[in-house]
Image: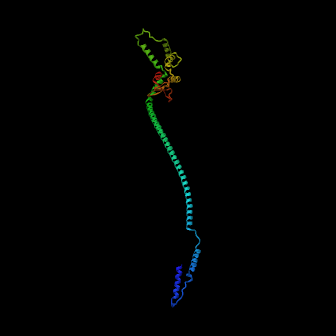
Amino acid sequence: MEKAIVSNSNQSLDHELVGTKPRSLTFSAPECLRPKALETLNGHNVSSAASNRSPSPSFVEVKALAQAKLKDELKRYQEELKLKDEEVTKLSKVKDQINEEVEELTASLFEEANSMVLEANIKQATAEKKLVEAQNKIEALETEIVALKQVLESTENHSQGHSDKHRRNLTNPFRQFSNKFSSKNKRNQEIPSIFENEIPEVDSVYYGEFLQWLDNPDLDYAKPFLARIYGEDILTCLELSNKNLTQIVQRAIERSTFHMEALIDPIIREDALNGIKQKCKYRIKCTDDSEDWLYIGQNTRNRVN
């Protein structure tokens, strides 16, 4: 500033001296160049510049304020970060717990599914086994039915003829014997015997009862001859453990409704008349229209026949 004022003063002085004649003048410095004036001018300029600027804090204060503000924000962010970390930790624990529960549930579901599959496989295997057994039984029964039909077809005519013949014989069971006896007597009367002088050894009581029955042969049990035969021969053979069934068989024989057939394949079964489990080779029924066959063994067949 002082240099500018001095420069200006010099320029004005040179301007005044141009075009004039030299003369001796006493030079006196302008008042503005005097030390007091300069001091006054400097003080005025400084005060005016200071008055133009508003008062402001120092750099240290600004720095301190900025640091304090940053510290506050840092502290706040740290607290928020801490809260976020706690929340993340809590959520991580919840996630781990949920994962464990899901794993346990998955394992339980797999175990239950495996158990159900195993149980289903066992049931399926059992059902298939039962099905195979049932099919085998059905095939066996069908085979047996076919065999029985063949047996029935092959023996139907024979059994029918045997039944008719048996019925005719039982209608008058002693007719054939009486005819043979009569023809024999006739032959004995026609042909002289060489043993006429010998007396035959017979039971006179039996023979008398027989001659009495021969005059009128029938199935009246009240006659002594038939009563003796039933008591000594027939009833003793029919003394079996099943008394009721034995009586039914006896009446069926008397009425000619008794049927007996031989089995192609003997079976192990309880004998219907003696109650003993044995190999049964025959079957019997006591009526013509009955389909209920009773199975008997060889010994029972010999006693009944």
Q: Position of residue 125 (x, y in %)?
A: 47, 39
- Pick whichever, 233 or 208, lies toward us: 233
**Can you say which quadrant of the picture contains the N terminus?**
bottom right
Quarter of the rendering containing residue 60: bottom right
Is the residue 11 above or below the residue 80 in the image?
below
Pick the front one: 205 or 141: 141
In the depicted structure, whether residue 85 falls above or below residue 107: below
| Residue 195 screen position, x and y as percent | 41, 10
Spot the residue most to the top. Answer: 197
Q: Identify which residue is drawn at 46% across, 18% down.
A: 177
**Position of 179 relative to 113 (above/below):** above
Can you name the residue that lies furthest to the bottom here? Answer: 21
Q: Residue at x 53, y 86 (%)?
A: 13
Q: Position of residue 23 (x, y in %)?
A: 52, 90
Which residue is painted at 53% across and 81% down in the image?
6
Q: Is residue 3 left or right of residue 183?
A: right
Name the image colouring: rainbow
Query: Is residue 225 positioned above or below 127 on the image?
Result: above
How many numbered marks does the figure carry? 0
Q: Position of residue 278 (x, y in %)?
A: 46, 25
In this orientation, which residue lies closer to the viewer: 243 or 5?
Answer: 5
- Image point (53%, 79%), residue name: 2
